[in-house]
Amino acid sequence: MEIPAITTYQMREVDRLMIDEFHINLIQMMENAGRNLADLAKDRFLDHNPLGKSVHILVGSGGNGGGGMVAARLLHNWGAKINVYLTHNHSHFDGIPAQQLKILNSIIQIISD
């Protein structure tokens, strides 16, 4: 099955529609994306059981990085040993990704630089 692709412009328009027309805010979208990513990782790479397994996650300072941090938090809650690596210093994070970083940093040690 071929998976359709969209351009960066089209993705920005999807995000705009979600927020402006459907009133689903960015943090909701990020939480949903992170939860689905965690479920996918658990099922596809962790044999449906993350308990005690090591997971390494590389996150950037944007929205996808925020989703990665949500996935890291959930996998940690499910018993995985999480290592999160930042592509940027903490000071480069702002908005909702910074909020996700603050939450995650209170739970696990994050590796930067």
Image: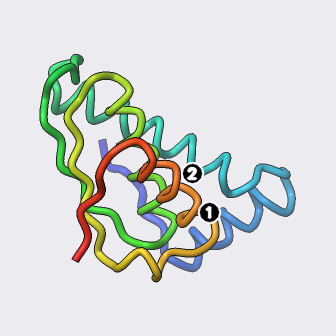
In the picture, the quarter occupied by the N terminus is top left
Residue at 57% in and 51% down: 30
The quadrant holding residue 59 is bottom left
Determine whether label 1 and label 2 are within 8 Å by CB: yes
SS at badge 2: helix
Q: Is residue 7 above or below residue 69?
A: below
Residue at 58% in and 59% down: 99
Residue at 42% in and 62% down: 65
Q: Is residue 112 above or below residue 84?
A: below
SS at badge 1: helix
Residue 2 locus on image (x, y percent): 32, 49
Kind of residue sitting beneath label 2 = Met
Kind of residue sitting beneath label 1 = Ile
Mark 2 crowdedness (10 Å alpha carbons): few <14, some 14-19, many ≥20: many
Q: Earlier in the sequence, mark 1 or mark 2?
A: 2
Q: Is residue 23 above or below residue 113?
A: above
In the picture, the quarter occupied by the C terminus is bottom left
Tell me the tag on residue 30. 2
Q: Would you name the residue on which mark 1 appears? A: 96
The quadrant holding residue 43 is top left
